[in-house]
Image: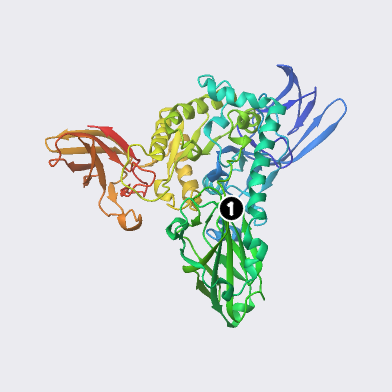
Amino acid sequence: MLSNGMIIQRDVSFPVWSGEKVSVTFLGKNYNTQNKDGKWLVMLDPVQAGGPFSMSITGEKSCFIIEDIYAGDVWLCAGQSNMELQMERLRDDYEEEWYLKTYPLIRQFKAPQESDFSCPRDEFTGGVWVTASAQTLHEFSGTAWFFAKKMYERFQVPIGLVNTAWGGTPVETWMSEEALSGYPEKKATGKQYSNAAFRETVCKKSEETVNAWYDELNSNDTGLAQEWQKKENSQWSGAQTVSLPGDFCEAGLKNFCGSVWLYREFEADGEFVKSEVKLWLGTIVDSDTVYINGVEVGNTGYRYPPRKYTVPAGLLNNGKNSIVIRVICNNGEGGVTKDKPFRIFSGLGSIELAGNWQYRIGVRTRRCPESFFIQRQPIGNYNAMIAPVLKYPLKGVIWYQGESNDPAPHEYSDLFKLMIKDWRKNNGNEELPFLFVQLPVFGKPSDNDETSSWAILREAQKEALSLPVTGMAAALDLGEWNDLHPSNKKGVGERLFTAAEKTLFKTQNTSPGPALRSCVKRKDKLFLHFDNCGSGLLSRYSGTESGGAAVPHVSVMDNGKLVRLPAIIEGTDTVSIDISSLKNPQKVLYAWADNPWDRQLFNSEGLPALPFRINI
């Protein structure tokens, strides 16, 4: 982090650590190091926002100068893939971001993605500060960019983003050994990988096992051997049909593992075939290779990225064309995701590809062995990617994570709060501002279900607001039922900013959204009272396929069964529920599912009501 282009936290003393005795010259003042815990430390005087500055560091045998330094606000941007997800992936949704007249002074430091199970590191092994521009924006975290942009617009000070996010990582990977002291099994799991030989053996064995599965699949795939991608339609006569987009199980391929070859023809002509065109296929489970007229135009190795391929000019024929998709199904859940763009298009026209496709099975095989990911083991990411940041003063933390704790959601409330407290302790700031995203919807819409893991995770995240100087961006309505990585990162970033305004700068707003304050029973009615309503509660159509409704609904537990009932808005902060039809009402649930049908309640500022469950 201590390198050219860095942004340091304004208005506080800034530390310069060294492995040897050095002198530092900064803003015309000379500083000498002092020994602290066996290391050499210089504390620079606080600096107001501004720059550029330079810093000279002189040791016994060397001297170097750090250029282009600015003082501003530095934010640690952490979590998993929805924080990591880059602007490049969002280019089609936010193309205007690449055409700004002037770019705010925002810089990102992307930490190397590494794990260390031995001890907390003092420094990163690499990384550079990158200034936002049309040429570099694609590298930035989407969530962090939109958050930082609002921060800059409001305060007009340089913003530094230290991006340590890593996809697929549970919260315990971002916790120190000390923070996990109450979880000895997790601690022991992480510490065993401090043995380099053991770690290498486990990783190598997993890699070899998975590679062997792919080698076996490819060597036995009839489609590869016979080059099905080059065959004309006559060679596909007699093939079975499948409706796409859709799950392969709907075509009789339930629990199928292996390769499926998909074939379809389409007509194109005129100027359309002479130009470069785009091919969008949504997302595909699990991996795919796509051919147009026998020529490969793209491939993706895992299920989550959107399939957005380019068909070069001259490849399309005037008239009949063929598209072949080879899909590898790893674990019996193959298919093409519904409700995603599925077409070939350009500015000259669009050809929809939805409908019946022919398919042939290249090879059937066993389920792919589960891959081992070292970054998913406890402690390692904290030591390598968080500890080096916490040595420096920060304005705060923004955090987007939780999806990978789906298998054990009941642990999350305690783990998350332990992590926040530990980071603050190791940063030397017990009130380090910590802003986080509450999980959006995901999965097929459903009724309320008290066992929902994502609902339990959202509750755990909300409980972290009991810690001081915390804020939450409620994102329930910003998700997509069919995408673990929803594209509305602008909404997420701006809600994090709204949380920051309220938490750090004491701005009066209704973040994070309507939160249940109390539940009162009067005769045959329940009255639910909310905070953060603004000028009033309102109902908004949830839009979750055909099950969406315009009137808010809750589920009330009655003798062990959930009964769906309407909730009537009364006044600015209250809804009422008629329970006269129930015999023994015990509990109320709202928006309590991975992707609940009923989530229609909002406040006047457009923020969604927080999911809740409460005993009557």
- SS at badge 1: helix
Q: Nearer the viewer, residue 196 or 241?
A: 241
Residue type highlighted by circle 1: Met
Q: Quadrant of residue 70?
A: top right
Asked if 476 appears above or below 469 in the picture, the reply is: below
Q: Nearer the viewer, residue 51 or 100?
A: 100
User: Where residue 179 sits: x, y (%)?
Assistant: 54, 22
Query: Can you identify the residue that label 1 sits on?
Result: 87
User: Where residue 519 sits: x, y (%)?
Assistant: 23, 34
243 sits to left or right of 616:
right
User: Where residue 195 sits: x, y (%)?
Assistant: 69, 25
Q: How is the image coloured?
A: rainbow
570 sits to left or right of 338:
left
**Which residue ends up furthest to the right in the rendered image?**
61
Quarter occupied by the C terminus = top left
User: Where residue 197 sits: x, y (%)?
Assistant: 72, 28
Q: Quadrant of residue 71?
A: top right
Seen at 52% across and 65% down, the residue is 359
Q: How busy is the neighbourhood of tag 1: few (under 14 within 10 Å), some, or many (20 plus)?
A: many
Seen at 47% across and 62% down, the residue is 245
